[in-house]
Image: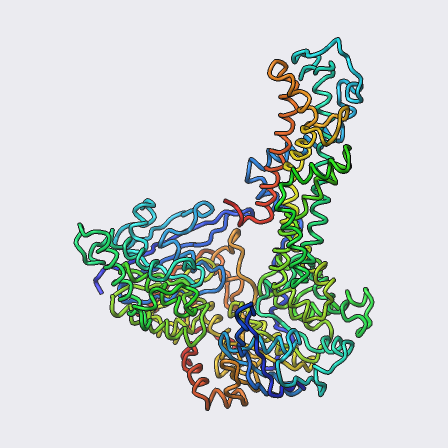
């Protein structure tokens, strides 16, 4: 070897030429982990199916006029048949059409609730976790306050105050939805704040905003996304519950909970009017939960078992 | 270049209603002076106050008493703008190459970030920053095509090179090297030590090298200070300290050092 | 000399399956350990040293791991053909293990004493000599005896006031003290073989030398065989009687410490030693090791070190080199062993 100090170690170039996986590799790797679990695949298929139905809804519904409220009383309470695979309800409307059309309403409402809750919760949690001190104290006590009132009761109170309607219902549920995210994000932010790369950014003289948005938040996105997907099912269920109680969406908007609410009067004789909307709720909740579990495994394989 | 005058740091324990909080003294009366262009070693075991010292020099914490002067200026008296300029002059390389790089940023973003933060001082536009990032990567033995990869795609040694490139981005005069090789395998450590030495020769950098590994310190440092429980127990030319350790703690450390038998 | 080895690993092959494929992570490991021998297993990250240690106590999760061949003979019995129940009988009783991180291996919620007493009671079920109480003794008696054993063992590993400190919680102990507790825990069952995986890596040098001295004393007193897994050749020089150098799943060189360190004969061992800064080396002249550890999914043909070896020739890529005996048990798996043509 040479006696004078080389400016660079002569072999460094060779160390680098070893093939380094492209970043597409990372995706394939995640996909591989996802595929390891049959249940997550089932979840994904269910969720994709629901999305297709939600998007294509108006075009695939066999009786579009029933969805908009027209009735066919002559055809009341027909059991499932070829013409009406899910039967008809007390107004002679095709239950299949109503359930399919309800997918869009339920999915949209659930998504809106989760997005709004996650956004508000992330902002509040990030500020609380990063600022610490009395800011943290105030924000967290506020979220504790929310957690002391059962979510459904809280949503009912707000929905009752705002009046019926889809948007009002979403606001009502989301108003009680954020504390979970705030707590999650606060904890994650506090943990990430101590990470070495955050210290590195501080040593560079980076501003608090930069540290929070460039260094901390991107690193807490995965648990937020996982929670959102796990929450989707529960949000849909809550929307349906409000509909069932009769505070949420009013007929003729075909909302699963509202459908269920009307048909409970005709149980058990005309079981099909209740079973199918119920099944739809079940499938949506189940699908999103499985998907959420799968996503968690992909992002954090250590959390398995 | 860097002077610490009787620097002390105390941490107050958490105060509560019934408890006024105990103060823990992390550093006591530490004085040292680092000359331009030299490598100054700070040696100590865990809990000796090494970490506190780096945080004080980087001004992530303030000393309880004493002064820290960099290039003649008392850090405590600098204006915010002057402090920002100073941050560009002192940079740090961290111990853990896995934790000290943001996993969600590309190498390009990691290396250009210091230039972006200090753009007021450095005045580099976007294109120059990218060009300089490529230059820096070449300087530390990586290549331009690595710019758009993420940290997890690199080995420990390569990541430490990225960390060094980031530290050099603002054209600093001094690097604080906080155990830069202790997380690496010895064969990789040798490469990184040689890289650091080469960069020092080429760029005229001053190093403060913090380590618990005496053989590494002996290899890389001109002078050193041995820290024990927040106090400097011995300082001097590296070779002198190794040959004739004056302090009993230093002697104990040297005796405990797991060394290879000389061939 | 004629006594059969306590542990005899013969041609052990292990593979690990991941998304990228099946990696051949141990490719023909041979190692035999006798009583009173302290074997240092050294190598860099990913060389398979820890997997070798874990294989002996059968703690490698499988899948993804799969044993492709070879045997691990412990006292003449092949551990690879033993079932989990049989293995549990050996672990902690005849085979003791110490891990790197003394913090995570103690349960923070229980007092040190309770954890040691549990280990002692469990060990007593397999070897009633450990507590030395009659088999029909009540549990109160057994517990008291177990506590005595725990105190005695703690004292043995150099914890002063063991009788009082036994009721402390792990967090009240320093890192070095916790490592002593773990050693005590491993020793309670009076193992014949102790596997220590980087036991001092997380510790300060001053504490490290105390722990190493303690281990040496234990070997002497109990006639154990020890496998000390480490990345630090300095630790090997200080604490071991024998050393095996691993590279990419293969033991490239092994033998008595003194002979091997005096005459490193495999190019990898020499490169490793040249990477360590010693007093004679001038700044900037430290020799690193060019290149990277090979990908074990598609390992290099022939000698796994050949791609990084300055002396590699065509013959090296033909097939894995067989270990050559250099005398006195000093073996090197190299076609051209010896302090060969060192470049000027």
Q: Position of residue B94 (x, y in %)?
A: 60, 70
Residue C109 seen by the camera: yes
Q: Residue furthest top?
A: A74
Viewer-closest of C4 and A120: A120
Q: Left or right: B72 with respect to C111?
A: right
User: Across the whole image, how many numbered discs are drawn on residues?
Assistant: 0
Residue C334 seen by the camera: no
Quarter of the image where one finds residue B108 = bottom right
Above or below, C272 relative to A47:
below
Asked which colour scheme the image uses, the reply is: rainbow
Above or below, B248 relative to C102:
below
Viewer-closest of C141 and C37: C141
Quarter of the image where one finds residue B90 = bottom right
Q: Position of residue C331 (x, y in %)?
A: 36, 65
Q: Position of residue A197 (x, y in %)?
A: 64, 64
Q: Left or right: C303 with respect to A168?
A: left
Instruction: Tell me the residue at 51%/76% (across/down).
Output: C343
Q: Position of residue B176 (x, y in %)?
A: 63, 77
Quarter of the image where one finds residue B167 = bottom right
Viewer-closest of C335 and B204: B204
Above or below, C138 relative to C227:
above
Instruction: Tell me the residue at 73%/35% (across/down).
Output: A160
Instruction: Tell me the residue at 46%/91% (across/down).
Output: B246
Instruction: Give the position of the N terminus of chain C as an image quadrant.
Output: bottom left
């Amino acid at each position: 070897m040479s006696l004078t100090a080389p400016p660079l170690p002569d072999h460094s170039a060779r160390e680098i030429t070893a093939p380094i996986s492209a970043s597409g590799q990372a995706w394939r790797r995640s996909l591989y982990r996802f595929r390891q679990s049959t249940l997550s695949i089932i979840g994904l298929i269910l969720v994709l199916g629901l999305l297709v139905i939600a998007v294509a809804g108006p075009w695939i519904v066999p009786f579009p006029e029933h969805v908009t409220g027209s009735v066919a009383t002559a055809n009341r309470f027909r059991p499932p048949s070829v013409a009406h695979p899910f039967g008809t309800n007390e107004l002679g409307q095709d239950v299949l059409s109503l359930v399919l059309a309800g997918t869009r309403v339920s999915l949209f409402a659930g998504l809106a609730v989760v997005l709004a809750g996650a956004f508000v919760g992330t902002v509040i949690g990030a500020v609380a976790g990063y600022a610490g001190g009395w800011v943290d104290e105030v924000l967290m006590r506020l979220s504790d306050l929310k957690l002391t009132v059962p979510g459904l009761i809280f949503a009912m109170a707000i929905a009752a105050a705002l009046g019926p309607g889809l948007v009002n219902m979403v606001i009502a549920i989301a108003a009680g939805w954020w504390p979970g995210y705030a707590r999650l994000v606060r904890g994650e932010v506090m943990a990430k704040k101590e990470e070495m790369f955050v210290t590195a950014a501080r040593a560079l003289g980076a501003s608090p905003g930069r540290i929070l948005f460039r260094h901390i938040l991107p690193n807490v996105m995965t648990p937020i996304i996982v929670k959102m997907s796990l929450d989707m099912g529960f949000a849909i269920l809550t929307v349906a519950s409000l509909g069932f109680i009769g505070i949420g969406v009013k007929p003729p908007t075909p909302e699963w909970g509202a459908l269920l609410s009307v048909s409970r009067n005709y149980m058990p004789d005309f079981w099909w009017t209740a079973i199918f909307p119920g099944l739809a709720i079940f499938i949506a909740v189940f699908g999103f939960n499985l998907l959420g579990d799968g996503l968690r495994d992909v992002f954090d394989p250590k959390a398995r078992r | 270049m860097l002077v610490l005058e009787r620097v002390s740091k105390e941490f107050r324990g958490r105060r509560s209603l019934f408890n006024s909080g105990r103060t823990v003294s992390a550093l006591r009366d530490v004085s040292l002076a680092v000359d331009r262009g030299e490598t100054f070693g700070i040696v100590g075991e865990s809990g000796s106050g090494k970490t506190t010292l780096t945080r004080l020099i980087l001004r992530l914490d303030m000393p309880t008493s004493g002064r820290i002067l960099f290039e003649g200026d008392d850090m405590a008296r600098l204006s915010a703008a002057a402090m920002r300029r100073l941050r560009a002059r002192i940079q740090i390389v961290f111990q853990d190459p896995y934790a000290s790089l943001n996993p969600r940023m590309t190498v390009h973003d990691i290396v250009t970030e210091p230039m972006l933060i200090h753009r007021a001082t450095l005045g580099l536009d976007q294109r120059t920053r990218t060009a300089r990032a490529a230059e820096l990567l070449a300087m530390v033995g990586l290549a331009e095509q690595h710019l758009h990869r993420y940290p997890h795609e690199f080995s420990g040694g390569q990541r430490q090179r990225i960390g060094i490139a980031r530290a050099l981005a603002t054209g600093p005069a001094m690097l604080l090297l906080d155990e830069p090789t202790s997380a690496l395998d010895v064969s990789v450590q040798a490469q990184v030590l040689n890289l650091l030495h080469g960069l020092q020769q080429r760029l005229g950098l001053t190093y403060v090298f913090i380590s618990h590994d005496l053989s590494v310190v002996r290899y890389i440092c001109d002078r050193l200070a041995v820290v024990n429980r927040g106090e400097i127990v011995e300082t001097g030319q590296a070779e002198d300290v190794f040959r004739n350790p004056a302090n009993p703690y230093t002697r104990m450390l040297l005796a405990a050092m797991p060394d290879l038998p000389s061939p | 000399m004629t006594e059969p080895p306590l542990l005899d690993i013969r041609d052990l092959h292990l593979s690990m399956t991941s998304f990228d494929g099946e990696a051949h992570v141990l490719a023909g490991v041979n190692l035999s350990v006798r009583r009173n021998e302290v074997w240092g297993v050294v190598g860099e990250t990913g060389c398979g040293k820890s997997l070798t240690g874990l294989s002996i106590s059968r703690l490698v999760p499988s899948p993804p791991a799969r044993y492709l061949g070879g045997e691990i003979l412990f006292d003449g019995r092949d551990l690879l053909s033993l079932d989990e129940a049989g293995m549990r009988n050996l672990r902690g009783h005849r085979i003791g293990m110490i891990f790197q991180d003394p913090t995570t291996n103690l349960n923070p919620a229980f007092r040190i004493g309770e954890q040691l007493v549990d280990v002692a009671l469990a060990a007593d079920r397999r070897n009633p000599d450990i507590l030395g109480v009659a088999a029909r003794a009540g549990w109160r008696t057994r517990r008291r005896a177990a506590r005595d054993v725990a105190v005695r063992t703690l004292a043995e590993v150099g914890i002063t006031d063991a009788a009082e400190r036994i009721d402390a919680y792990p967090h009240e102990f320093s890192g070095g003290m916790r490592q002593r507790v773990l050693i005590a825990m491993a020793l309670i069952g009076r193992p014949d073989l102790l596997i220590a995986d980087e036991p001092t890596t997380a510790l300060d040098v001053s504490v490290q030398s105390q722990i190493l001295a303690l281990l040496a004393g234990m070997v002497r007193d109990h006639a154990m065989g020890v496998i000390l897994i480490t990345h630090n050749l300095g630790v090997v020089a200080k604490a071991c009687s024998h050393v095996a150098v691993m590279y990419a799943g293969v033991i490239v060189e092994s033998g008595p410490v003194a002979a091997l360190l005096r005459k490193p004969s495999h190019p990898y061992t020499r490169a490793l030693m040249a990477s360590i800064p010693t007093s004679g080396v001038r700044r900037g002249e430290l020799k690193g090791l060019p290149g990277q550890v090979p990908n074990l999914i598609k390992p290099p043909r022939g000698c796994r070190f050949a791609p990084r070896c300055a002396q590699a020739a065509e013959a090296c890529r033909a097939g894995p080199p067989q270990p050559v005996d250099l005398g006195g048990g000093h073996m090197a798996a190299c076609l051209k062993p010896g302090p060969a043509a060192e470049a000027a």
